[in-house]
Amino acid sequence: MDHQTTKPKNKMKKFLIILLILAAAAGSYGYYLYNKPRSGVSEMTTAFTLDAKGFYSEYNADENTANTKYLGKVIEVTGKIRSVDTDDRGTMNIALETGDMGAVNCQFEKKDKMPSVVAGNIVRVKGICSGFLLDVVLVDCEIINEKNS
């Protein structure tokens, strides 16, 4: 009788070990995906090329329509740099003039490729539109070119 109770215990141990291995593999894969470097937008096809003022105006006039048109798409925006800031995570943000209180906020995630830009210069930036939060926000940005104003 002792032999019969041992078999179910061995099967349960094997099942738990397999379950533990699968959970560890899934956790490792999730960790890899979370920490995987973002791909840059330089190789992506641009959906729209706009000036900062027109881009902001579309969002300011009708956010829902602009989201339908631009959200999640690769956009190239040209404008005059209002300000350049770096947040506590090391993310650089460039605000482009719009002729309004709001701006087109361009966020650069790649810490090793931070551009050196100067407020007042004209710049063309390529990034992915992530919507409107008082400013139009582009993420994963890269500088296409910059000119002194």
Image: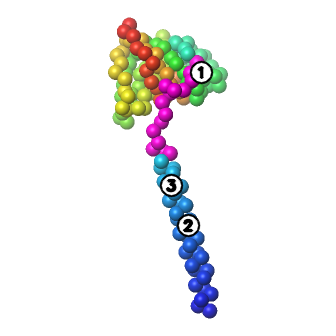
What's the residue type where badge 3 is placed? Answer: Gly
- Residue 15: % across, % down: 58, 70
**Which residue in the structure is indicated by mark 3?**
27
Q: Magenta span has 36?
A: yes
The answer to whether residue 125 of the structure is visible from this angle is yes
**Depth check, front residue: 90 or 4:** 4
**Depth check, front residue: 133 or 92:** 92
Q: CA distance from mark 2 to mark 1?
A: 47 Å
Up-down relation of residue 43 to residue 25 (above or below)? above
**Depth check, front residue: 56 or 109:** 109
Colouring mode (rainbow / by chain / secondary structure / one colour): rainbow
Give the position of the N terminus as an image quadrant.
bottom right
Magenta stretch secondary structure, dominant: loop
Label 2 neighbourhood size at 10 Å, few (<14), some (14-19), many (20+)? few
- Residue 30: % across, % down: 51, 50
Up-down relation of residue 61 to residue 64 (above or below)? above
What's the residue type where badge 2 is placed? Answer: Ile
Q: Element type at marker 1?
A: loop
Task: Provide the residue span drawn in magenta.
Answer: 33-48
**Which residue in the structure is indicated by mark 1?**
47
- Residue 22: % across, % down: 55, 61
Q: Earlier in the sequence, mark 2 or mark 1?
A: 2
